[in-house]
Structure formats: C-alpha cells, structure tokens
C-alpha cells in the first residue's frame, strides 16, 4: 500500500472521534520523515516505532488523542517535554499556526539533532528544540498556554504546573507499571482529570524517575 493511501485510511479511521483541526494537522505533517528510513513504509501503521536510543515515536492515535484533549488553538505558546523524533511537536506546531510557538525539550543529544533535522526536512519552522531536563519545564520561556509530555512521570511535576498560564492545560502520562493519561487545567486552582490507561517510556530527570539510564 502506498503512503498517501495508508495515511488517508489512518486519518479516516479517527474521524468523528478526534477534532478535525487535529486530523488536518496530522494530514499536513509527513510522519515518514520522522521515522528511521528503513521503517518509512510503515509510517502510517497505527503503532509506536523505534527511533533509536531505546525510545519510540508515539502511535498516531496517541498523538491525536493528546492533541485533541489539549485543545490547541492558533497563536498559542506550547511546551513539549520528550521531543524524540520531533513528530508530535510538528503536529502541535501546525495546530498553533505561524503565530504560535512550540518549545520541545529532549534530554538525549542524538535525538535533539535528529528532531531538528526532521523538522527542517518537514519545513516546520515554529519549533525550537532544546536539549535538557524537561521535567523542570523551561522557566525562561513560561508561561505556556499548553504543555504536552510524552514520557510517564511518577507524579505531576510541580514546575510544569507552575509554568502553565491561567486557563492553561497540561497533558501527561502519570505512573510506572500502570499509567494514566492525565489532563490538568489551571483555573483558580488546578483541575485534574484522568482520561485513560496508557503506556509510555519513563520520564527521566529531577521531577521524573531520577537520572538513571534506561
Ligand atoms: N514526542 C516524541 C515521543 C518521544 S518518546 C515523538 O513524537 O517522537 C519520549 C521521549 O522523552 C524520549 O525521546 C526520551 O528521551 C524523552 N525524555 C525522557 N525523559 C526526559 C526528560 N526529563 N526531559 C526531556 N526529554 C525526556
């Protein structure tokens, strides 16, 4: 099956469950440019795929669900933690539009380089990839309208809550062996909603599972 057909089928399968703006953004971003060359013909299978360093690019439906729950609008300032291949950041960047800005933090230098290269190849210009411990957020660029975390934290990191603007939303997996996708909305206080069971790689770092190597 060719890529454009498998992409169309993948996105059609999500129609009705995922808002159209997210499906439109995913139809614009070429996922095949964010997976290793030998896996390109599998880019539109709805699966996580290995991207090196023991890490994975999330399955398309998981990127879709997270972007849908996050309700990203044009012009927003967004923080992504766990940049990996850069694919999820690219979808967020299309949703945020040319007036919006995405900061994507990744701790592994090889993946930082790969994400920058992939985003350039996909002609996505409004993502800044930062190397570092994203469990601490990026205080110098806060507040953020939206924060999306692609690795599972032992608990909701306080710095990420603090870096949300009022009305802001944070989506992240929380847990170890058993994980829940959690949506946090900042109003007067913080509204915390558990959405569904998920499986992500662990968030390493100070507010994650420590500095051990995986
Ligand atoms: N969003 C990515 C998915 C990457 S998987 C994509 O679209 O491809 C999760 C990523 O989180 C891994 O690359 C891992 O190295 C990274 N990660 C784990 N702990 C981190 C931390 N404390 N700071 C930044 N990145 C982290």
Image (cartoon, rainbow, N blue to C red):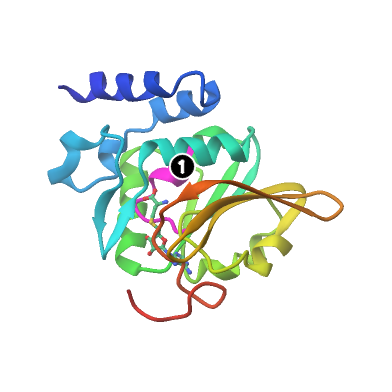
Q: Nearer the viewer, residue 184 or 102?
A: 184
**Measured from the top left, where is residue 36 in percent x and y?**
20, 48
Quarter that holds the N terminus: top left
Q: How many marks?
A: 1
Residue stretch rendered in magenta on the structure: 82-91
Q: Residue at x 38, y 32 (%)?
A: 29
Give the residue at the far front of this rendering: 178
Q: Relative to 129, does residue 27 appear above or below in the rendering? A: above
**Measured from the top left, where is residue 56 in percent x and y?**
31, 54
Residue 148 appears in view: no
Residue position marked by numbered label 1 in the rendering = 125
**Measured from the top left, where is residue 157 in percent x and y?**
62, 67
Quadrant of the image where one finds ligand 1: bottom left
CA neighbours of label 1 inside 10 A, class few (<14), some (14 to 19), many (20+): some
Q: Is residue 138 magenta?
A: no
Q: Residue at x 43, y 24 (%)?
A: 14
Q: Relative to 77, does residue 136 appear above or below in the rendering? A: below
Residue 213 appears in view: yes
Indicate the secondary structure of the residue bearing disc 1. loop
Quarter that holds the C terminus: bottom left
Q: Is residue 88 magenta?
A: yes
Q: Relative to 90, does residue 203 appear above or below in the rendering? A: below
Q: Nearer the viewer, residue 72 or 97?
A: 72
Q: Residue at x 69, y 59 (%)?
A: 142
């Amino acid at each position: 099956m060719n890529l454009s057909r498998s992409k169309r089928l993948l996105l059609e399968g999500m129609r009705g469950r995922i808002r159209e703006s997210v499906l439109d953004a995913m139809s614009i971003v070429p996922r095949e440019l964010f997976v290793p060359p030998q896996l390109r013909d599998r880019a539109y299978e709805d699966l996580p795929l290995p991207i090196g360093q023991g890490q994975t690019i999330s399955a398309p439906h998981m990127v879709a669900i997270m972007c849908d729950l996050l309700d990203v609008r044009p012009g927003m300032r967004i923080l992504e933690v766990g940049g990996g291949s850069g694919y999820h950041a690219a979808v967020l960047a299309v949703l945020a539009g040319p007036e919006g800005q995405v900061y994507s933090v990744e701790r592994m230098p090889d993946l930082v380089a790969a994400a920058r290269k992939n985003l350039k190849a996909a002609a996505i210009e409004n993502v800044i990839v930062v190397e570092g411990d994203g469990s601490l957020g990026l205080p110098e660029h806060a507040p953020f309208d939206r924060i999306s975390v692609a690795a599972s934290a032992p608990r909701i990191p306080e710095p990420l809550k603090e870096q949300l603007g009022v009305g802001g939303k944070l989506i992240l997996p929380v847990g170890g062996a058993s994980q829940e996708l959690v949506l946090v909305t900042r109003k007067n206080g913080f509204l915390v909603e558990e959405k569904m069971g998920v499986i992500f790689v662990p968030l390493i770092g100070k507010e994650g599972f420590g500095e051990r190597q995986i």
